[in-house]
Image (tube, rainbow, N blue to C red):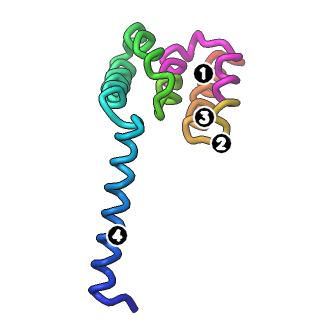
Amino acid sequence: MVTLDRAVELCKDAALQTARAVALAYFFGFVGPAAAQSDTDFLRAKDAYERGDRAKLDALAPGLKGHLLAPYVTYWQIKLGIDDVDYDTVRAFLSQYRNTPIADKLTVEWLKTAAKRGD
């Protein structure tokens, strides 16, 4: 059984480790103004997708290539053009992001579109 004092000590240790990790991330440049800007651009891309603004989404996409959530931007681009997208583009996405929720989502959308077209 963990005593109250030990629980407090464990919480302090966890907080200290988190603070160290954040400090190291800033020190090594993993987080900072560039990351904040790319997060802002990601949210702008999401907004463009939700409004159906392909031109704005396409303009923001290149700047988000290294972003952690870049697969979503690519998915949104494909989804907005799902009626016109070629099979190779879909296949490349599904291959690159195999066994991920976003690939499963695109598979469903692609199959619905193919069924509508009678493919």
Give the farthest residue toward the bottom: 1
Label ID, residue 99 = 2
Residue type beneath disc 2: Asn
Q: Whole-percent x and y of residue 55? A: 41, 7
Instruction: Answer with left or right where residue 72 lies relative to residue 113.
Output: left
Front disc: 2 or 1: 2
Viewer-proximal residue, 86 or 118? 86
Q: CA distance from mark 3 to mark 4?
A: 39 Å
Q: Are marks 3 and 2 in contact (CB under 8 Å)?
A: yes
Q: Whole-percent x and y of residue 46? A: 37, 25
Range of magenta residues: 76-94
Label ID, residue 89 = none
Residue at 64% x, 26% y is 93
Q: Name the chief secondary structure element in magenta.
A: helix
Sequence-first tag of 2 and 4: 4
Q: Quadrant of residue 56?
A: top left
Residue type beneath disc 1: Thr
Label ID, residue 13 = 4
Q: Quadrant of residue 89?
A: top right
Residue labelled with disc 3? 103
Vertical side of 53 occupied by 25: above or below: below
Residue labelled with disc 1? 113
User: Looking at the rendering, in which quadrant would you find the N terminus?
Assistant: bottom left
Residue at 31% x, 55% y is 19
Front disc: 3 or 4: 4
Q: Are marks 3 and 1 in contact (CB under 8 Å)?
A: no
Residue type beneath disc 4: Asp
Sequence-first tag of 3 and 4: 4
Vertical side of 35 occupied by 18: above or below: below
Secondary element at tag 4: helix
